[in-house]
């Protein structure tokens, strides 16, 4: 592969994967699957203009799973020499022979595997030197600190770039892989007033470095977000509408994904148990899954088992239209894999058409949440209680910052009572969502 920093070519990774499958067959395995991957990257962080860390990483690895009937064994190694491959396959076989029969174990069905796939434009190398990355980080941090004299300290600015590639294969004849990249810019600063200190941050992430926001813009936004949090107040306990800012709203969709995932469902540890076909959102809510989104953070032509991914409607006019299943969880549930071994692909929450400012105005009086703290979510019952910080809204205007509060509700009720989704779509990894307005929640304060 020309103009890459990879140690191995795609053909070499394919040969290694095929060799492992051959070794498994020769060892008596009825089926096997393997993936070989490598990656490298660098991260530079700067604090108060001085270089704080320079990290460079390079790794490689092999994972192999063998099946003797429905007995399963798994082993891995970071040594890709022939002897190490033999030993790893032997270890997986030894494990399989001592495990219990599992009726749901096995490869994905051959008829569901991908046979050809498009280039999703996921690989964009960034040939940036340490010196260049350091200068970008300095500019980002300086843009933040220059916003206001009250910005007295910094947690730093960072620039990171990661490239990776893999090949996955199995004994059904599937063999495929591709390279990918991810690049990040971030900044976090601290402001101080007589009432105390506050911190906030901003960041951007992209497959393509040319698509990243300007470093000065990221810095300025980090500084502005920090300054506006100074002199925060507490609230009395009250029930009011709550507006989740877009980055926080992506986390709400993350709870939905967790509850609709196969492992939670077959373990009966999900508040969406037996919920397929149920109305769990307002009638207008639509969430699509698009694995073929060009340069998408969670795009993939096939899942971790080689199953072809398919664009679909996950939430259809408020109805839960599907789960996120790999082959194992699907068999446990008596269903078919959805091509989600390894997780969900790009989930896109459709907006109701209002801007963020329009949602603030629509809310009238209530709480804007910009940060959540803690992990008070019960995935079995859907009970939700988390520390929060943000802003109080009165007469449709943001009035002052608030902190040391808790917001509480139940995810089932929260989802059903979403009033609107704004157009300010934020990409939070595998989820894309605008700010979400919930009609009413309990806000606990003093």
Image (cartoon, rainbow, N blue to C red):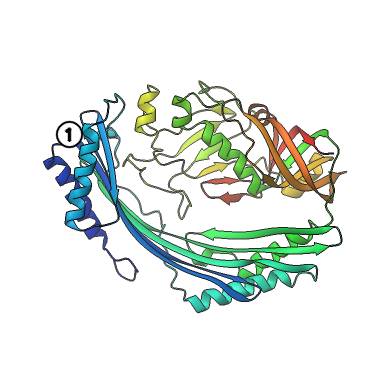
Q: Residue at x 35, y 25 (%)?
A: 331
Q: Residue furthest left?
A: 26
Quadrant in which residue 121 is drawn: bottom left
Classify mark 1: residues with Cα within 10 Å, few (<14), some (14-19) or many (20+).
Answer: some
Is the residue 417 above or below the residue 165 in the image?
Answer: above
Q: Residue furthest bottom?
A: 131
In the image, 113: left or right of 391? left
In the image, 11: left or right of 203? left
Asked if residue 360 can be seen in this view, the reply is yes
Circle 1 — which element? loop
Asked if residue 172 can be seen in this view, the reply is no
Is the residue 227 above or below the residue 22 in the image?
Answer: below
User: Between 396 and 259, which is closer to the camera in this rendering?
Assistant: 259
Label 1 belongs to which residue?
A: 30
Residue 279 locus on image (x, y percent): 59, 24
Q: Residue at x 64, y 42 (%)?
A: 351
Residue 404 locus on image (x, y percent): 78, 45
In the image, 101: left or right of 421? left
Q: Residue at x 77, y 42 (%)?
A: 405
Which quadrant does the N terminus fall into? bottom left
Is the residue 350 above or below the residue 416 in the image?
Answer: below
Residue 382 locus on image (x, y percent): 61, 28
Quadrant in which residue 145 is drawn: bottom right
User: Between 371 and 72, which is closer to the camera in this rendering?
Assistant: 72
In the image, 210: left or right of 122? right
Residue 439 locus on image (x, y percent): 75, 33
Which quadrant does the C terminus fall into? top right
Q: Residue at x 75, y 62 (%)?
A: 224
Q: How many marks?
A: 1
């Amino acid at each position: 592969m020309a103009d890459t920093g990879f140690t191995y070519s795609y053909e070499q990774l394919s040969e290694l994967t095929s060799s492992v499958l051959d070794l498994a067959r020769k060892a008596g395995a009825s089926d096997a699957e393997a993936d070989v991957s490598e990656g490298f990257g660098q991260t530079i962080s700067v604090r108060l203009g001085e270089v704080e860390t320079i990290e460079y990483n390079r790794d490689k690895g092999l994972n192999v799973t063998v099946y003797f009937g429905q007995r399963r064994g798994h082993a891995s190694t970071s040594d890709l020499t022939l002897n190490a491959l033999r030993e790893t396959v032997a270890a997986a076989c030894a494990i399989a022979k001592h495990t219990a029969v599992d009726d749901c174990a096995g490869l994905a069905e051959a008829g569901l595997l991908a046979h050809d796939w498009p280039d999703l434009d996921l690989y964009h190398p960034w040939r940036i030197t340490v010196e260049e990355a350091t200068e970008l980080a300095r500019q980002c941090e300086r843009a933040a600190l220059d916003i206001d004299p009250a910005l007295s300290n910094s947690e730093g600015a960072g620039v990171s770039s990661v490239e990776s590639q893999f090949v996955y294969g199995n004994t059904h004849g599937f063999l495929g892989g591709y390279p990918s990249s991810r690049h990040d810019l971030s900044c976090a600063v601290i402001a101080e007033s007589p009432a105390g200190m506050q911190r906030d941050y901003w960041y951007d992430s992209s497959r393509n470095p040319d698509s990243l926001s300007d470093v000065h813009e990221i810095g300025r936004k980090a500084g502005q977000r920090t300054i506006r949090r100074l002199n925060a107040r507490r609230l009395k306990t009250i029930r009011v509408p709550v507006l989740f800012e877009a980055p926080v709203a992506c986390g709400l969709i993350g709870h939905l994904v967790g509850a609709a995932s196969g492992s939670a469902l077959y373990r009966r540890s999900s508040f969406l148990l037996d919920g397929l076909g149920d109305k769990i959102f307002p009638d207008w809510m639509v969430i699509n899954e698009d694995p073929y989104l060009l340069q998408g953070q969670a795009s993939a032509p096939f899942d971790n088992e080689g199953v072809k991914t398919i664009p679909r409607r996950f939430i259809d006019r408020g109805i839960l239209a599907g789960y996120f299943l790999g082959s194992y969880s699907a068999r446990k549930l008596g269903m078919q894999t959805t091509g989600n071994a390894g997780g969900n692909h790009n989930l896109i929450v459709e907006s109701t058409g209002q801007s963020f400012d329009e949602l603030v105005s629509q809310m009238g009086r209530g709480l804007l949440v910009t940060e959540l703290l803690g992990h008070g979510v019960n995935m079995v019952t859907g009970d939700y209680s988390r520390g929060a910080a943000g802003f109080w809204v009165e007469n449709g205007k943001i009035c002052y910052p608030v902190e040391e509060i808790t917001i509480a509700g139940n995810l089932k009720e929260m989802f059903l009572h979403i009033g609107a989704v704004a157009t300010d779509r934020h990409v939070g990894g595998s989820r894309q969502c605008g700010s979400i307005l919930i009609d009413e929640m309990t806000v606990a304060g003093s």
